[in-house]
Amino acid sequence: MSSSISKKGLGRGLSSLMGDTKDVSIQNETSNQETKISISNLKPSPSQPRRLFDKNSINELAESIKSRGLVQPILVRPSPTESGTYEIIAGERRWRAAQIAQLHEVPAVVRKLDDQEALEIAIIENVQRSDLSPIEEAAGYKRLIENYGHTQEALAEIVGKSRSHIANIIRLLGLPQSIQDMISEGKISSGHARAIMNSAFPEQLAEKIVSENLSVRAAEDLAKQKKPGVKKVKLKDPDTIDLENNLTAKLGLNVSIDHKGKKGGSIKIEYRSLDQLELVTGKLKN
């Protein structure tokens, strides 16, 4: 962790990582001592806020590890559910690359951390590295607020951000899923998203931003315009979204449902090859 971040107001998890907690003792390891852990005994953490890992950058890191080894240790905690294994708190990308590089073990620092501390450290580590998409960052903050009772002010101190940054980024989670996906994929920025957030037709504006490569300022101007003939986007209810997710998981293809109440609706299944089409028709025939 960067020593330039003030320790004042930091969560106990980060303090432990920085060596402030003196009672951490695992297998006679001191609080800052490294050990070697088998690759097979390491597992990703469910607290990991990062969900997207760029394959190209991981492959590049793997090549570097092959020639220079893994320079920075991975931070782990003993698995709370599986004896003899360790949960990765910070360094999952390095762990993935080490597997590609065919390492049998990696350097690691072991800490006794509870779920809150693990989530705090994972978020802080990723935020400092700018590894999280705005949506991943927002989801992590939301979990700390809803599950562990953090206020936005306290959370701002923990991660070294302003309270307004915390508030604004969490608001992104109120956008339609299609726009959240655009943000995660880097098609539009969080600035673009905030510009169209209060629009009656945000999804159409987001598509226009992408297709015309508009700046944030242009997006703000676009959102102020009154577009006659453009219908307000009706957000899908949670039950419909849940059904879409279940069908998508079962088919392995994107499924969208357009439910129009008493008027019925339609189901759209997207496929990209004839093999996928045959898969769908085969399942419908059964």
Image (tube, helix red, strand yellow):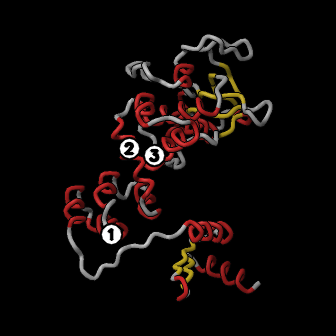
What residue is shown with label 2?
Answer: 167
Name which residue type carries label 3. Ala
Q: CA distance from mark 1 to mark 3?
A: 23 Å
The x, y position of residue 159, in whole percent, is: 43, 31
Q: Residues within 10 Å of mark 1 (few under 14, many from 20)?
A: some
Q: Give whichever of 37, 217 is nearer the camera.
A: 217
Q: Residues within 10 Å of mark 2 (few under 14, many from 20)?
A: some
Identify the element where label 1 is drawn: loop
Q: CA distance from mark 2 to mark 1?
A: 22 Å
Is residue 82 depicted above or below 263 in this figure? above
What residue is shown with label 1?
Answer: 200
Is residue 139 depicted above or below 176 in this figure? above
The residue sitting at the right extreme is 83
Identify the element where label 3 is drawn: helix
What residue is shown with label 3?
Answer: 138
Identify the element where label 2 is drawn: helix
Is residue 187 depicted above or below 50 in this figure? below
The x, y position of residue 167, in whole percent, is: 38, 44
- Image-based side of 286 in relation to 72, left or right: right
- Image-based side of 193 in relation to 58, left or right: left
Q: Give whichever of 7, 96 is nearer the camera.
A: 7
Q: Which quadrant does the C terminus fall into?
A: bottom right
